[in-house]
Amino acid sequence: MKLHDGINGRLRSFIEAQPLFFVATAPLSPDGHVNVSPKGLDGTFAVLDEHSVAYLDLTGSGSETVAHLRENGRITVMFCAFEGAPNIVRLHGTGRYVDLHDAEFASYRGFFAEHPGARGIVVVDVQRVSDSCGYAVPLMTHDGDRELLTRWADNRGEDGLATYRASKNATSIDGLPALHHAARTPDVPR
């Protein structure tokens, strides 16, 4: 393993080339559930500078990451090379959730591609950057992004997404508060 002072040119190029990344968070309670979420879709991750990154959070079945960030901010983002030379990059830091109803949402929205169902942006202050060999990570090819989430969000529409968030994303599986504005109808453009 090698530690880095920040997300330099080589690491930035590697990160930006990966079609998949993983996000890990955990609640403070020893009885709470640790969460690891796979993330993807083209145009949903951005390196903001050498010490900060962000990703577009799309409406999904859970809200563990949001709840954990609101409770304690701890987050790790991991990228693996599934093609080419083996490598694993981990970004450890403190994250915060910018809800799509927050005024700050618009200042970050331009970093990402248009995706229906955006419910917020996760911004990470990166405090530790490391990479390691990744020798055991399998070789796999990226055939393309799945379009299921995009179609699902388009079919629901903004009102349907707001209703879904209110019923499925207001709290974590451990009962921690997640999306504060889950019941409000979005008034910010996608």
Image (spheres, rainbow, N blue to C red):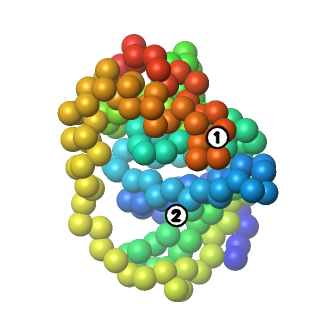
**Image quadrant containing the N terminus:** bottom right
Along the horizontal axis of the image, is 15 left or right of 161?
Answer: right
Cα–Cα gap, marks 1 and 2: 29 Å
Foreground residue among 135 and 98: 98
Residue 152 visible in the shown view: yes
Q: Amino acid at mark 1?
A: Gly
Q: Residue at x 53, y 21 (%)?
A: 181
Mark carried by residue 142: none
Q: Residue at x 39, y 24 (%)?
A: 162
Q: Quadrant of residue 4?
A: bottom right
Considering every residue shown, the one lying at the far bottom of the view is 136
| Percent position of residue 90, x then y | 62, 63
Q: Amino acid at mark 2?
A: Phe
| Percent position of residue 6, x then y | 68, 54
**Image quadrant containing the C terminus:** top left
Mark carried by residue 175: 1
Q: Quadrant of residue 39?
A: bottom left
**Label whose residue precedes the other's in the sequence (1 or 2):** 2
Task: Characterize the local packing of mark 1: few (<14), some (14-19) or many (20 or more) Cα atoms within 10 angstroms.
Answer: few
Q: Residue at x 64, y 33 (%)?
A: 177
Q: Secondary structure at mark 1?
A: loop
Residue ID for mark 2: 79
**Residue 56 sits above or below residue 24 on the image:** above
**Residue 3 sits above or below residue 167 on the image:** below
Q: Secondary structure at mark 2?
A: strand
**Residue 43 sits above or below residue 138 on the image:** above
Along the horizontal axis of the image, is 164 left or right of 126?
Answer: left
| Percent position of residue 80, x then y | 50, 69
| Percent position of residue 141, x then y | 30, 74
Residue 108 visible in the shown view: no
Foreground residue among 171 and 90: 171
